[in-house]
Amino acid sequence: MPLTALLYLILLSTSVIVYLTRYHDPTLLVGLTREDGPVEWATVLALVAFSALLFHWMRKLRSRISGRLRIAGYGLAVLALLAAGEEISWGQRLFGFETGETMKKLNHQQEMNLHNLLPGELFNGLIIFAVGLYMIALPMVWRAWKKGPEPWWLPSKELSLLTLATILVNHYRVTSLPEKAGLVILGLLLVAATIQAIAQKHPRHLAACLIGWLTGGVLYHCRDVLRAANMQYEIRELLVILLAVRYCAEALEKLERCGSVK
């Protein structure tokens, strides 16, 4: 799938650019991840595309899915559009309007958006925790305990492994025990997945594991380059949105094949 290939490309490009920045000029990395830069606008476009995808599929499957599922799909589509507006602070820098005094006091970046009312590390941590829980932990538990055909909403194993690689786009300035424990757990999961992919001779799973090792290894080695947390946040936000788009496309395609869901 083109979107899966794009995820691989962005993960690989991140490692290459960070590595080159470690030993050469940081201009490219800074330019790509700056506010209103290419990565941020790519995230906005991905969110708009995500919303359009959901609207399209909800209309296409409206006679075959339950009302609750349609409401959830339309709600997520609206949420994606709101997130696109939040990402660019509702065009504040584009149109040059000022932040109100009250918002300046509450907002950590003094911008006209809601997500920066929380500290950046906390906000991103909550998102990554939720993504890891649904895209990695839930499929792992389901496959360990359930037998038979997998449900349409369960992420594929390759997508779970790409989620693991995405979470490894980390700032690596971990100080607390939970952060350290989290990295150890991610490492152990990657080891187990790699052993399993080799044993099963599954090339796509092995490729996803290798991109995880490359991402984690290079970014940890070059962690002094990533002194500005925003660099990783911008890249990781784009990857998370693309994962969400790929997951929804995958789930909705399976839903279409499996018939009516009421």
Image (cartoon, rainbow, N blue to C red):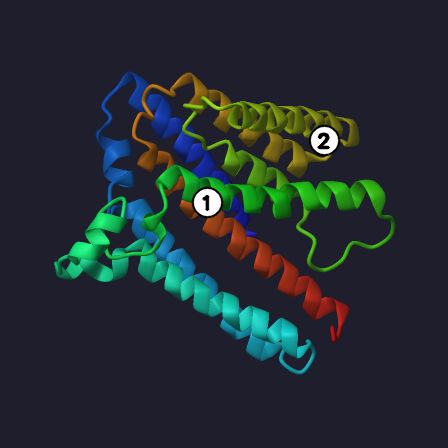
Disc number for residue 239: 1
First in sequence, mark 1 or 2: give its number: 2
Give the left or right position of residue 90, taking residue 241 as reference. left
Q: Which mark is residue 93?
A: none
Q: Is residue 259 visible?
A: yes
Residue pictured at 35% horizontal, 26% vertical: 18
Q: Count the numbered circles shown.
A: 2
Q: Secondary structure at mark 1?
A: helix
Kindly report which numbered mark, 1 or 2, lies closer to the viewer in this rendering.
1
Look at 59% across and 54% down and name the residue there.
247
Q: Position of residue 228 (x, y in %)?
A: 29, 30
- Please state the horizontal and vertical placement of residue 39, each as a whole percent of the image: 32, 45
Instruction: Return the x and y of residue 131 as percentages of the image width and height.
Output: 56, 46
Asked whether 168 or 180 is in front, the reply is 180
Residue shown at 64%/74% (left/top)? 68
Q: Is residue 67 above or below residue 91?
A: below
**Vertical placement of 215 versus 109: above or below?**
above
Describe residue 114's horizontal placement relative to residue 159 as left or right.
Answer: left
- The residue indicated by pointer 2 is 197
At label 1, the amino acid type is Leu
